[in-house]
Amino acid sequence: MAATHVGGTLVQAAAADATTVNPILEADTVSADITSLIFDAVIHVDPQTTEPRGDMAKSWDISTDALTYTFTLQDGITWHDGSPFTADDVKFTYDLHMNADSNSPHTAELTERIKSVEAPDEKTVVFTLAAPASPFLVNNMIYEIVPQHILQSVDPKALAQHPFSTGKAGTTIGTGPFMFKEWVKDDHITLEKYAGYWRGEPHLDSFSLKVVPDVTTLVQQLQTGEVDYSGRDGVDEASVKTLQSDKSIVVATYDSFDFTYYGYQLDDSKTTLFQDKAVRQALFYALDRQQMVEAIRFGLGSVAIGTMGVDSWAYTPDQITLKYPHDVDKANQMLDDAGWVKGDDGVRAKDGQRLAFTLHTNSGSDVNTQYAAVMQQAWKAIGVDCTPQENEWNAFLERLTSTHDFEVFLIGFSWGVDPDQSNMWSTAAYEGGLNVNKYSNLQVDDLLEQGIRETAIPTRKQIYTQMQNIVVDDLPNAIIDFPKSIAAYNKRVHNLFPNAVDDRWNAHLWWVDA
Amino acid sequence: MARYLARRVLTLIPLLLGISLVTFLLATATPGSPVSRLEFNPSARPADVARIKAQLGLDKPPVERYLDWLSHVARGDFGLSLITYRPVSTTILEKLPATLLLTGSALCLSLFFSIPIGIYTAARRNSWIDRVATIVTTGGIAVPTFWLGMMMIMLFSVKFRQWGLPALPSGGMYSLHGGGGFGDRLLHLAMPAVALAFVQTAVWMSYVRTQMIEVLQADYIRVAGAKGLSHWTVIGRHALRNAMLPLITLLALDIPALFGGAVVIETIFAWNGIGRLIVNATMQRDYTVVMGEVLIIAMITVLANLLADILYQLADPRLRHG
């Protein structure tokens, strides 16, 4: 089948350079875009169902107490240097992740979750968990496996500066469809096909990831053919028209796990403005979110209902009670009832405190900038004085996560595939998690715990619907929209299916017109 | 002269120390850190972030970090990048040739155009060519480099392709679709080099013109003319030499400006040099790379200044020190 479509190069763009080609160390999407072609994992997430699917695992078995996972591995998998892949490599990889001397960002979570990893024979790996954890397969078994025979003699402390991590042909080897060839820093990474790939020889000769930091330049390079594929979510809404008018380009828009939200400061040592739930809800009612999505996202997205992304199996909009339709009268009424009275300057106040605050967002996002401006206007109409302020990305993150120096912030984010949202809503997620505004509801904490322990999807769905209804009523964070992701690629590229879960699952089948 | 040189070189040391200290203070005062990609990231726990920070030495007090860095630099070790874990010296040196190629080409282009046009417009003052050149010069000095670069891409890469004309590549140093030959590289170099050269050409052209006009009014030129020498012989033999000498100094002083321009042009044209490197390193809070590169650019700048001073001394005997 391969014979007719063999050869050629596919060039994908990335907004930044990768930071590493070692999957143990990676914490950014660009590095993941490269390592996912060089390496394979035990489990992959099915792009259609978002459920776990075997990657290098042929099958797996979960014990009835949900503590023991036994994986049977595929036959005939080899590393790029020809040596056979075995269960020991899997054990080695996870042990390395859990070694505190390595720079793995997953050490804490894996150490907490996994009690032991054993490889009783070449084709079997057994994971024993400390407690049942339903997201385990899709969250933790998707880490790519590294070769024991290359890395076993490397001191984990020196792993980050080892050629395996900084990229060296013949040393940076995996089991995936493409082999590492060269990395010209800040410019491109080139991979070439691995003819011995276990799923079959790839069609492409080579693949390059090219750094194109600016979206305007990316659009130009797609048009000139210098770039074949924008990468997942590589194109912004404003560029869609330009690209669609170009006959050589395909524009794909698809549901995702993305969302845009703003968070209220709930820590009363920072501000007391948002302690009253009525204020938080009133502000949300004042926003015409449908109009925002139409005008600013060019309709590429939907008004958020609940907290689960559109692509998630836990997205249950019909069962969410509070949908926050645009209702200015209701917003005004709620603020009146809560005792916030308009002063001479048109701004509401209560007990001498004006309803005035700064809305922090990040620079470099046209959508967030425009959303902030619209929110300022909408809130002004109900007597709320909001001043938008843009922050450079790194400074913004420090403001949110370290100093917590904000009243309201606006940001875009993306959920993982599993609907566990402990990282944002649980009380514990204040320290280092996404719960930067110090939300705490013990009932939510309890439901999140249940959601992790429960393994049956229908039951989990119910638990998460219940959790969403409480969170949406408490409204620590108001989720504005669920944007669609946008990707663009040249018509010469075939078999490429951009989606929110995984666009790499069939990389060995990608081909390009000569 | 030797003593003067020694004195000048010695004064460079406190200057470079001061520059490195200021850079370090600015870098540490800026919010954010090299590990911020791990923050607001559900896959990394606070314990992991703290551990990785400590492994990078970022948990130490700033004074200790600066002294640490300084003692390593004194031994010629610029340390590892905090993002890629590769040696800072390799990171910078592997990109330096690209920047030198770009700035060097721009320099040659500017000289190639600015000197002849400057001379001609001075010799034919108030001719229509002079007027056109003056307008272009004023425009050239006023146009921001980034705007010029983007307009060139818009016209020569995007519009030319739409109109079916031979288009230039919009960025990068060579094509990833089987490119990399001499012709391919030359096509990629064309636009960024011209964009970078444009402003310089304008500045030098007006400088050459002014200088020439001044010299042409000198008595010895009138004498040369009175001897019966032709207009262009007077310019070529007598005026040019005197007008050109100060230009050498200006050239040396302008080298740092070329590096500055490269920061903008390299970012726009995705030219993989040290200008783009410092922008990225700053964004990523890659302190060691920022410090290393600032130090190297500072060295180039002070050395260029020193060179300018020396050339001045050589060119003008009145300034020669004992």
Image (spheres, coloured by chain):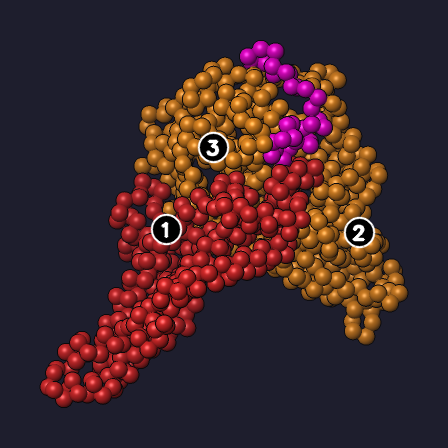
Chain colours: A orange, B red
Q: Nearer the viewer, residue A264 or A336?
A: A264
In the image, residue B86 above or below residue A215? above
> Which subunit holds the residue at mark 1?
B
Of labels 2 and 3, earlier in sequence is: 3
Mark 1 is on which residue type?
Ala
Provide the secondary structure element on which disc 2 rests.
loop
Mark 3 is on which residue type?
Pro
Residue A348, quarter of picture = bottom right
Residue at image x 82%, y 69%? Answer: A342
Residue identified by numbered label 3: A163
Start-end of magenta stretch: A98-127
Residue identified by numbered label 2: A266
In the image, residue A72 above or below residue A255? above
Mark 2 is on which residue type?
Leu
Residue B25, quarter of picture = bottom right
What number is the disc on residue B98? 1
Provide the secondary structure element on which disc 3 rests.
helix
Give the distance between the C-alpha atoms of the residues marked 3 and 1, in whole angstroms. Answer: 24 Å
In the image, residue A85 above or below residue B177? above
